Structures are given as structure tokens and as C-alpha cells.
């Protein structure tokens, strides 16, 4: 029998148990990969911004290309008003991307495959965007729930739907990333298990499938980070430039 | 107990708790709230540090680098443009100078040529005049010589004939008869000797 494909998502304590009050904040494998991802981002971008040469080095090019990539993404979706939030969206994109990518290395832990992590990020974005919207537009921000050009008869229904869709934003945002990462990793584990159980005779088929899946999962890892960041930009755009 | 309530509060108020935890026991470690607080804490800590360091230290540097490069490239392009324009004007000036000097050279050439031709003609004319004069003079001399020639020749002929006759005969012969004969001969055959 193959190993349980879900064991890869198990969180376990590394080192001693740390408690603040009754809260357990022990350092776990999840924490370890959060720290590794953050450190990797900081090291790469620090190296990439240290020396400014007219013809950039490889690391510098990497840093500058990601900078302009995120910058273009924000200005395309949320306009120039979103410039103060650039640093946040950049860190968010990089953090999710690096967590996803580190998860692609065998025997590592994928931070973003845990609903609590993505949910905290998504609800932080949701709450932040809502606060920004109310600060910028006051109670006028509630007009977001009243689309223009809707017949009066349908209005109550539409408003309810809009409110539900707005409130489900953090859930959809977090579940999208979490489910994608979890499903991908589970599937890879399952196919990896098939390789073992089918042995040298029949194991080649799931093995080749597994290799193909790895490529797909790397794509998904990037795509989900991108989607996470771009949806944040779109929510921010709603808050900054009220369209309805 | 507080921890458990906190967990319920933050996420599962809206959900059916029993079913969720059933899923956890069925094999989804994500739904085991044991380490949720720890994950939230470490996420906040790492992401917070990441955000602060990126926004305060690294991103401004990258942005400055990009801006600097852009301005540098812009400056270089502008400088190159300026130099190109300068060289174009210089080239134009150069061509103008060349054209002018060519025209000048042509003019000078023409002038000198005309002058030289004029000089040559003048000299030629004067030389011609001189030559004509000399020719005239020489012709006059020749003519004079020609005129005097028959008389002298006659005299020589007379003297020579008288001498020859004296040697042949041994006596003096009257000169007048010889001169008459010579004159007569020269008159008859003069045109044969001097008609050239």
C-alpha cells in the first residue's frame, strides 16, 4: 500500500514547544519554510539591488524584471492610484511564489497548501481593501453593491448577490490557492505511489506522468501566485476607483 | 480552551464544525487546528519582516537603479543625437567649403588661362611684327644685292675674260669690246641667270 498522500501536509514541531499564554507558537516545518522563502527573497533581491551597473548582472536583471513585471501588473489592473500599495503586492506575490516554488522541491513543505495561511493572507487583503475603500469613498463605497443600469425590480436581488460575492472574496481567494496547491501535490504523491506499487514493469507510465505533472505544477505554482496578486490588484482597484 | 474558541471564531463560525473536523480525521492535516496559531504567528512575523525590509530597503533601491539607468540611457541617447546633429552640420559646412573652393579654383584657373593666353598673343604679335620687319629688312638687302649683282658679275666677267684672252693670245685687248660683248650676253641671257 502506498503512503498516505496527505501526510506531506502534516505540520510538526521543530525544536521545543513555545507558548505565549495558552497559544502554541512553536517553530514548525511550516514556519521553517516561511522563513526560508522570506530569506531567499530578501537575499536574491538584496543581491539584485546592491550594485547598479548599466548592463545588469543576472541577479540584478532578475530583480529588475520582477520589479517591472509586478509594477506593470499593478498599473494595468489598478491604475496609478495603487502605487503606494506596490510594496505590499510585490511582497505578497513574491512570498506566495517562493512558497509555491519551494514546495515543488521533493521532501519540502508547501506553506500555501494550508488553508489557514492563505486565509489569513486573503482576509488581511479583504479587510485592508475594505478599509481603504471606506477611507477613500466614505459610505459611497457601498455603491459598489449597486451596479448601474439595473432595473429597480431586480435591485434587491442584485444587491444581495453583490454583497454575498463581496463577502466571499476572502474565501474564494484563499481556497483557490490552497486547493490548487493541495490538489497538485496530492496528485503528484498519488502518481509517485503508483510508480512504487506498479514496480519496474508498469511503473514507467505513472513515472512519465509524474514528470509531466511536475512541469504542470511549476506552472500552476507561478500562475496561482500571479492570480493571487492580480486578484488583490483587482480588489484594490474596486476600492480605489469606484466604477459602479 | 481559549485557543479552541479563538480558532472557531476566526474561521469556522460560518461552517459546520462537525463536518469539518470529520474531514480532518479523514486525512486532511490542513483542517487540524493544532498548529493554526503557530502558522498565523509565523506567517505574520515572516511576511511582516519581508514586507518591511522590501518596502523600506530593497524596493526603493531597485526603483532608483531603474530610474538611474533610464535617465542615463536617455542622456546618452540625447548626447548621441546632439553629436549626430553637430556632425551633420559640420559635414554640410565641409561640403560647402569644398564646393566654394572648387568654384574658386575653377575661377582662378580660368583667369590665369585667359591672362596667359592674352600674354602669349601679345608676345606673339610683337614677335610677328619683329619677324616681319626683319624679313622685310632682309628682303630689302637681298633685293639690293640682287640689283647690284649683274653689274658686279659683268665686271668680274669682263675682267676675267680679258685676263683669259691676254693669257691665250698674249696681247692686250680693248676692254670696251669685251664689255660690250658681256653686256650684250647678260642682256640676252640675264633672265636665265637671275630669274630665280
Image (cartoon, coloured by chain):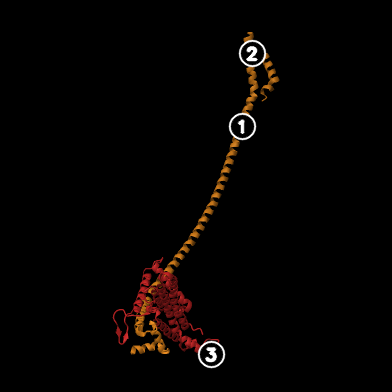
Chain colours: A red, B orange
Which is closer to the viewer, label 2 or label 3?
3
Instruction: Name, please, the residue furthest toward the front.
Output: A201
**Does dot 2 land on a helix, a strand or a loop?**
helix
Asked if residue B89 lies left or right of residue B12, the reply is right
* Nearest the eye: B82 or B3: B3
How many C-alpha atoms fall within 10 Å of the one at disc 2: few (<14), some, or many (≥20)?
some
Which is closer to the viewer, label 1 or label 2?
1
Disc 1 + disc 2, Cβ < 8 Å = no
Residue A115 on image: x %, y %? 40, 82
* Nearest the eye: A30 or B134: A30
Residue drawn 35% across and 84% down?
Answer: B34
- The disc placed on residue B162 is 2
- The disc placed on residue A20 is none
Q: CA distance from mark 1 to mark 2?
A: 39 Å
The quarter in which the C terminus of chain B is drawn is top right
- The disc placed on residue B135 is 1
Q: Label 3: which residue?
A: A155
Residue A5 on image: x %, y %? 40, 78
Q: Is residue B73 above or below residue A9?
A: above
Residue A54 on image: x %, y %? 41, 66
How many C-alpha atoms fall within 10 Å of the one at disc 3: few (<14), some, or many (≥20)?
some
Amino acid at each position: 500500500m502506498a503512503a498516505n498522500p496527505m501526510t506531506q501536509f502534516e505540520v510538526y514541531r521543530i525544536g521545543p514547544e513555545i507558548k505565549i499564554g495558552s497559544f502554541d507558537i512553536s517553530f514548525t516545518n511550516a514556519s521553517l519554510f516561511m522563513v526560508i522563502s522570506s530569506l531567499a527573497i530578501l537575499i536574491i533581491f538584496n543581491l539584485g539591488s546592491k550594485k547598479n551597473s548599466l548592463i545588469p548582472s543576472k541577479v540584478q536583471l532578475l530583480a529588475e524584471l520582477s520589479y517591472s513585471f509586478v509594477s506593470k501588473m499593478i498599473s494595468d489592473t489598478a491604475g496609478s492610484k495603487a502605487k503606494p500599495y506596490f510594496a505590499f503586492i510585490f511582497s505578497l506575490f513574491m512570498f506566495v511564489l517562493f512558497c509555491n516554488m519551494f514546495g515543488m522541491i521533493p521532501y519540502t513543505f508547501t506553506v500555501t497548501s494550508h488553508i489557514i495561511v492563505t486565509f489569513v493572507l486573503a482576509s488581511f487583503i479583504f479587510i485592508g481593501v475594505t478599509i481603504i475603500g471606506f477611507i477613500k469613498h466614505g459610505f459611497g463605497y457601498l455603491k459598489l453593491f449597486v451596479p448601474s443600469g439595473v432595473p429597480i425590480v431586480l435591485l434587491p436581488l442584485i444587491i444581495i448577490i453583490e454583497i454575498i460575492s463581496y463577502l466571499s472574496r476572502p474565501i474564494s481567494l484563499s481556497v483557490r490557492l490552497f486547493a490548487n496547491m493541495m490538489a497538485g501535490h496530492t496528485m503528484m504523491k498519488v502518481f509517485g505511489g503508483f510508480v512504487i506499487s506498479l514496480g519496474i514493469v508498469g511503473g514507467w507510465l505513472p513515472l512519465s506522468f509524474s514528470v509531466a505533472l511536475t512541469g504542470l505544477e511549476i506552472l500552476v505554482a507561478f500562475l496561482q501566485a500571479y492570480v493571487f496578486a492580480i486578484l488583490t490588484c483587482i480588489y484594490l482597484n474596486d476600492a480605489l476607483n469606484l466604477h459602479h | 480552551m481559549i485557543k479552541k474558541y479563538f480558532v472557531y471564531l476566526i474561521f469556522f463560525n460560518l461552517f459546520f464544525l462537525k463536518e469539518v473536523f470529520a474531514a480532518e480525521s479523514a486525512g486532511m492535516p490542513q483542517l487540524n487546528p493544532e498548529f493554526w496559531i503557530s502558522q498565523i504567528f509565523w506567517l505574520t512575523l515572516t511576511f511582516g519582516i519581508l514586507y518591511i525590509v522590501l518596502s523600506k530597503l530593497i524596493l526603493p533601491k531597485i526603483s532608483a537603479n531603474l530610474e538611474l539607468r533610464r535617465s542615463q540611457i536617455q542622456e546618452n541617447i540625447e548626447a548621441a543625437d546632439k553629436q549626430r546633429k553637430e556632425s551633420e552640420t559640420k559635414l554640410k559646412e565641409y561640403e560647402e567649403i569644398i564646393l566654394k573652393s572648387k568654384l574658386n579654383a575653377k575661377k582662378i584657373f580660368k583667369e590665369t588661362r585667359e591672362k596667359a593666353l592674352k600674354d602669349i598673343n601679345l608676345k606673339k604679335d610683337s614677335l610677328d611684327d619683329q619677324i616681319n620687319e626683319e624679313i622685310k629688312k632682309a628682303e630689302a638687302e637681298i633685293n639690293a644685292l640682287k640689283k647690284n649683282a649683274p653689274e658686279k658679275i659683268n665686271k668680274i666677267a669682263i675682267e676675267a675674260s680679258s685676263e683669259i684672252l691676254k693669257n691665250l693670245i698674249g696681247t692686250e685687248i680693248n676692254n670696251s669690246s669685251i664689255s660690250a660683248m658681256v653686256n650684250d650676253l647678260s642682256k640676252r641671257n640675264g633672265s636665265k641667270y637671275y630669274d630665280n
